[in-house]
Image (cartoon, rainbow, N blue to C red):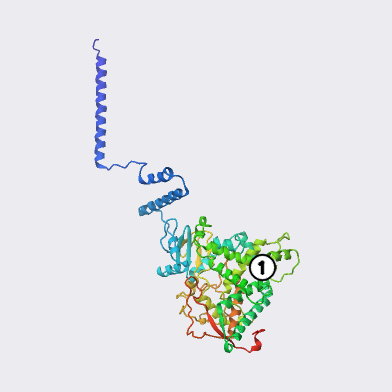
Amino acid sequence: MGFHPNTAHAHAHAHAHAHAKKNHRLAIEQRAKTMENQTPALPSFNTTTPFISTLQMIGIGYPSTPFNICLFLFILAVTFIFVAECTPPGRKKTNPILLPPGPKPWPLIGNLPGMLKNRPVFRWIHKLMEEMNTEILCIHIGNVHIVAVSSPELGREFLKKQDAVFSSRPKTMASDLTSSGFLSTALTPLGEQWKKMRRVVTSEVLSPARHRWMHDKRVEEADHLVRYVFNQCAKGVSGLGLVNVHVAAQHYCGNVIRKMILGRRFFGEGMENEGVEEEEHVEALFTILGYLYSFCVSDYFPFLRGFDLDGHENVMKKAMASMNKFHGPIINARVRQGRDGEKEANDLLDVLIRLKDADGGPLLSEDEIKAQIVAIEELDRVVGKDRWVQESDIWQLNYVKACAREAFRLHPVAPFNVPHVSVSDTTVAGYFIPKGSHVLLSRPGLGRNPKVWDEPLKFKPEHHLKDGSEVVLAEPELRMLSFSTGRRGCVGVNLGSTMTTKLLARLLQGFISSMPPNVESIELIESSGDLFLATSLLALARPRLALSLYPDAQT
């Protein structure tokens, strides 16, 4: 084959082109080697890293049991928290508004270990506030923020200035059982049911007109109280009778409530004095009061309800069974009589039964009536354990009322008010308060605050007599907490104030009290589990008025 000049030229051109491509490739490889020597290699994504392997083990390598699923979710949550904590400060998304100070919570469970370790919880909360030198504290239990307050200024911010925000109630196991599924007033979260029952209570049960209507029943029970103490004196030596003031006050309050609500003093037929039934009834009332908001674990972890890990549910169910045993038959029979027109209204139960709606039907169901009866008793019990009554000339008894206020301030019946729940996010005193927070006003914290009261640990009725004006038991400025204020404030202020003043005035007027034999001083030491006295208050009483003034005294 002969040589052609065009073919030779083509071969030369192809050879030159191939050589150029080879040189270009070599240059690229050389540059890559240079960069490799200068820059650390990035790790490749490996699906067998320890974390992924753990997830695979839980999700795939083992059966999908509830335990494994929970363990998976727990590890996942801890991982996210760990990653968030390890993120450099410049890359974190921070909230400029901080929560109130408090102990650092654990992931998911919050401060639950601290709550379980430190019982009673209210003393732990007060100790934390003291140690952290703060008048507002936030603890986390599960996903609930519990905010405790011991400052009047902060209290007014929560319950007066932002009253509408903090106007709901928490849904707890005890409040659910007590109110028959949130059918009553004081314990029911914000909503239509609360509005309905609030109207009933304020217009029909605790209105000024109804208060006057029940006057004679309260007077009758005040006479019974005097008779009881007088008879104790008559049974003693030299006209002196040993009186357990705590027991006398409990039964006086129980008798007033039963008389006003059910129209009877006792549950036993033909009884003239308290018996086993009344003791069981009073004990059940105090039990319900003590466990109503007692930091039950299932209140913050609802899926644990029914397991009764701390025993609260069993205690509450037994107490409610005792209450229903006494109330149920009476209420059922009276409902039938009242709605059949067989009985006139003589007490508050009759009033509730006869209420009609717009169509002329019964306004309240039997369950709502039963729930409201219990709610009224609890309301009166909270107000009445250390809050009793004198109705005649109450406006003139300023010193007696100042003594009652001082007792509320220094020796409150409960550590906190009924919790208020925020219905939206808000800010108080520069702190972020999330929606759903439980706000607790500390009764000892407010009443014993040295920034508010001079000599805060000394009993001084003069604390309340400084400007010469009439003394009232309510405290709208929240320097102490006798009755709650605001939209969810106590609707029984009038009744509670009357009962408190009347009891104290009757005992002071009718009897001279002294210490029992071999007792040199009265120890006002609180119980370890609550704010009641560790030992019962005993007094040696003797009449101070003419014997003819004591009602139907029997020896």
Q: As rendered, which of 405 and 124 lies closer to the eye?
A: 124
Circle 1 Cα neighbour tier, 10 Å, few/some/many (<14 / 14–19 / ≥20): few
Q: For the C terminus, which image quadrant? A: bottom right
Q: Position of residue 176 (x, y in %)?
A: 57, 61
Q: Position of residue 380 (x, y in %)?
A: 60, 71
State which quadrant residue 402 falls in. Answer: bottom right
Q: Position of residue 8 (x, y in %)?
A: 24, 16
Question: Position of 393 compared to 530: left or right?
Answer: right
Q: Is residue 497 above or below residue 138?
A: below
Q: For the N terminus, which image quadrant? A: top left
Q: As rendered, which of 260 and 266 lies closer to the eye?
A: 266
Q: Residue at x 69, y 71 (%)?
A: 347
Q: Would you name the residue on which mark 1 appears?
A: 203
Question: Position of 40 compared to 527: left or right?
Answer: left
Question: Position of 131 compared to 185: left or right?
Answer: left
The disc labelled 1 sits on which kind of residue?
Answer: Ser
Q: Can the viewer see residue 425?
A: no
Q: From this viewpoint, which residue is outermost toward the top? A: 1
Q: Is residue 472 above or below residue 7?
A: below
Q: As rendered, which of 192 and 12 lies closer to the eye?
A: 192
Q: Position of residue 288 (x, y in %)?
A: 56, 67
Element type at mark 1: helix
State which quadrant residue 251 falls in. Answer: bottom right
Q: Can the viewer see residue 441?
A: yes
Question: Position of 454 compared to 387: left or right?
Answer: left
